[in-house]
Image: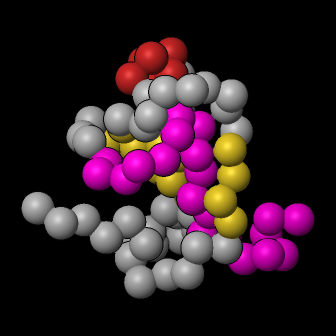
Amino acid sequence: MKRRFSAGRQITGLRQVLDCPAMSTTLRQGPAAAPGEPPDWLALLCTAHSEALPEWPALLPTRTGLSLSCGSVLDYRSTKQLL
């Protein structure tokens, strides 16, 4: 099954929030800007970091298919929201 993580939106930022050499295996999503909207950000984590952060919202227990390092965050918020 092919997934579209961007939901037709432009990525406004790519951040690296963890210093982990592992590749990501799971995806966590941030809250939506409004009910029914897609998430404002997606965090890609290795298994160890995903399990260590159970309080992070909306664990999607699936392989992402993306080749990004653990701790990569794809941001969809506006530049104003990022500042």
**Which residue occupies 26% across, 42% down?**
63
Q: Which corner quadrant holds the N terminus?
A: bottom left
| 56 inside magenta stretch | no
Residue 42's spot in the image, x, y percent?
Answer: 51, 53
- Report the span colored magenta: 64-83
For image coordinates 70% across by 39% down, the residue present is 17
The answer to whether one can see residue 30 in this image is no
* Horizontal side, residue 65 vs residue 46: left or right: left
Colour mapping used in the image: secondary structure
Please provide percent x and percent y for residue 73.
59, 51
Q: Is residue 67 above or below residue 19?
A: below
Give the residue displayed 31% in from the left and 70% down from the top: 4
Q: Is residue 63 visible?
A: yes
Number of dots carrying numbers:
0
Main structural element of the magenta stretch: helix, strand or loop?
Answer: loop
Q: Residue furthest left?
A: 1
The image position of residue 11, as x and y in percent, is 58, 73
**4 left or right of 13?**
left
Picture quadrant of residue 75: bottom right
In which quadrant of the rendered image does the C terminus lie? Answer: bottom right
The verdict on residue 65 being magenta is yes
Q: 80 or 10: which is nearer to us?
A: 10
18 shown above or below 62? above
Name which quarter of the figure residue 74 lies in: bottom right
Q: Where is residue 61 shown, x and y percent of the image?
A: 27, 36
- The relative height of residue 76 versus residue 31 in the rendered view (above or below) is below
